[in-house]
Image (cartoon, rainbow, N blue to C red):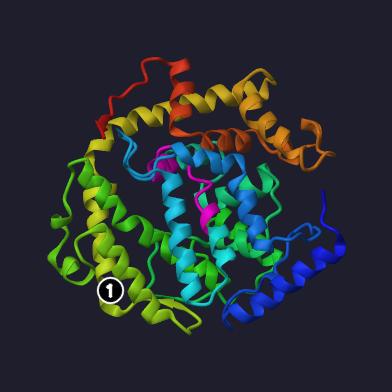
């Protein structure tokens, strides 16, 4: 049931007036946001609607069993993607309040930024990317995958500032000072940046809003010390193993490091048109990332299971490519991917009520197979792989 026009218009007017009072001069206002396909307004801010669409998407639900860093353990306490994106959204929203930025915009970007991550984290992404190159469709980038899932597969019709922030996030690239890109925020420029990513002519693209820049920086804050905490729970290392030069500046606990990074960011970013750290904190942060890279992200314990995972990716690709091209409609690539998404879409867009009318279903088979694999949770991936080859097992350590 829709609200009466007089009540709806009043709410919209009051929301705009509230923005004018709360948002700083460098914030992105709700009233400027555009969708590729315009829609009528409702009582929520336009970015709140985007956040709601992301939370209720099929892709968001799969965060619950997608690996953050440690795919080779069973544990109830180390973080998966679901916790990570919640941490990013929480920290980014708190910082947006202090910096007078658009809280709803940063929340929507944060919640959607890792949708495109594949099973087994960055390691799984590298394996899938090699498969994609082998089959002639170019590499796989999870940031591009995030907006592809939300916009093309699930047809969420998000606003451009949210889509831009998701596309341009990169928690593995660190900057002491991050300005919003000077490129104009238009759908045409957005498509050009996507093409540059696809043809590898440009890999470092930057958000066009200060909110997107904030989320990009907070992505690192949310995982850098939490990954150490998870590693400590697993017995891989301790916070006391962090270089003394880093401990002296950032601290030696998860809580302390996060607080230090946030406080420094506020001090160096407030009332500014950029997001920045001080020199000494940024230097310590880059040293801490190098420590994590050597002691966690490149840890030798995952080398053996990675060989098995790579074999499983190849088996699943071949199986579902054959099922798709041979139109085996009972296959899970139809039932659990194409039809599942279509059934969700047609509740919102009744005219798209068959695969023939579903634009995504006309993509190349290689693209659809890639997306089916990328969208899987770790557990679902193994269930399908072991149906084909029961010998595909490894024995992860259990940590509670």
Q: Is the residue 18 above or below the residue 378 in the image?
A: below
For the point 63% across and 31% down, which residue is it?
337
* The quarter of the displayed image where residue 26 is located: bottom right
Depth order, front residue of 299/246: 246
For the point 62% across and 59% down, which residue is it?
163
Q: Is the residue 111 above or below the residue 379 in the image?
A: below
For the point 53% across and 67% down, which residue is it?
212
At which x and y percent is residue 339? 69, 29
Q: Is the residue 217 above or below the residue 147 in the image?
A: below
**In the image, residue 113 lies in the stretch drawn in magenta:** yes
Residue extent of the magenta highlight: 110-126
Locate the C terminus and report the quarter of the image it occupies: top left
Residue on which the image places disc 1: 281
* The quarter of the displayed image where residue 267 is located: bottom left
Q: Secondary structure at mark 1?
A: helix
**In the image, residue 150 lies in the stretch drawn in magenta:** no
How packed mark 1 is, by other alpha carbons closer than 10 Å (few <14, some 14-19, many 20 or more), is: some
Q: Is residue 79 left or right of residue 95?
A: left
For the point 54% across and 37% down, which residue is it?
375
């Amino acid at each position: 049931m829709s609200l009466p026009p007089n009540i709806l218009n009043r709410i919209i007017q009051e929301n705009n007036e509230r923005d004018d009072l709360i948002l700083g001069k460098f914030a992105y206002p709700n009233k400027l946001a555009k969708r590729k396909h315009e829609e009528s307004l409702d009582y929520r801010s336009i970015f709140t609607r985007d956040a709601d669409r992301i939370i209720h998407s099929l892709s968001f639900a799969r965060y619950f069993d997608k690996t953050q860093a440690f795919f080779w353990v069973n544990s109830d306490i180390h973080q998966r993607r679901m916790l990570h994106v919640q941490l990013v959204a929480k920290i980014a929203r708190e910082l947006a309040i202090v910096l007078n930025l658009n809280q709803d915009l940063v929340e929507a970007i944060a919640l959607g930024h890792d949708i495109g991550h594949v099973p087994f984290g960055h390691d799984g992404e590298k394996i899938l990317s090699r498969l994609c190159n082998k089959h002639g469709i170019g590499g796989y980038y999870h940031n591009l995958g995030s907006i592809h899932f939300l916009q093309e597969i699930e047809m969420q019709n998000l606003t451009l500032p949210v889509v831009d922030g998701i596309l341009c996030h990169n928690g593995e690239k660190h900057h002491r000072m991050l300005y919003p890109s000077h490129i104009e925020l238009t759908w045409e420029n957005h498509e050009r940046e996507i093409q540059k990513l696809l043809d590898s002519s440009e890999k470092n693209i930057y958000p066009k809003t200060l909110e997107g820049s904030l989320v990009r920086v907070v992505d690192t804050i949310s995982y850098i010390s939490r990954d150490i905490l998870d590693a400590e729970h697993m017995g891989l290392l301790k916070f006391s193993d962090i270089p003394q030069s880093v401990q002296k500046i950032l601290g030696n606990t998860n809580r302390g490091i996060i607080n230090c990074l946030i406080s420094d960011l506020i001090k160096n970013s407030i009332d500014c048109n950029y997001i920045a750290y001080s020199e000494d904190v940024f230097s310590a942060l880059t040293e801490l990332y190098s420590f994590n890279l050597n002691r966690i992200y490149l840890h030798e314990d995952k080398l053996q299971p990675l060989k098995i995972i790579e074999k499983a990716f190849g088996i699943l690709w071949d199986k579902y490519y054959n099922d798709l091209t041979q139109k085996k409609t009972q296959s899970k690539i139809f039932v659990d991917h194409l039809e599942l998404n279509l059934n969700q879409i047609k509740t919102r867009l009744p005219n798209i009520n068959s695969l023939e009318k579903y634009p995504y279903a006309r993509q190349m088979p290689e693209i659809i197979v890639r997306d089916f694999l990328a969208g899987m949770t770790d557990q679902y991936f193994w269930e399908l792989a072991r149906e084909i080859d029961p010998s595909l097992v490894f024995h992860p350590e259990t940590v509670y």
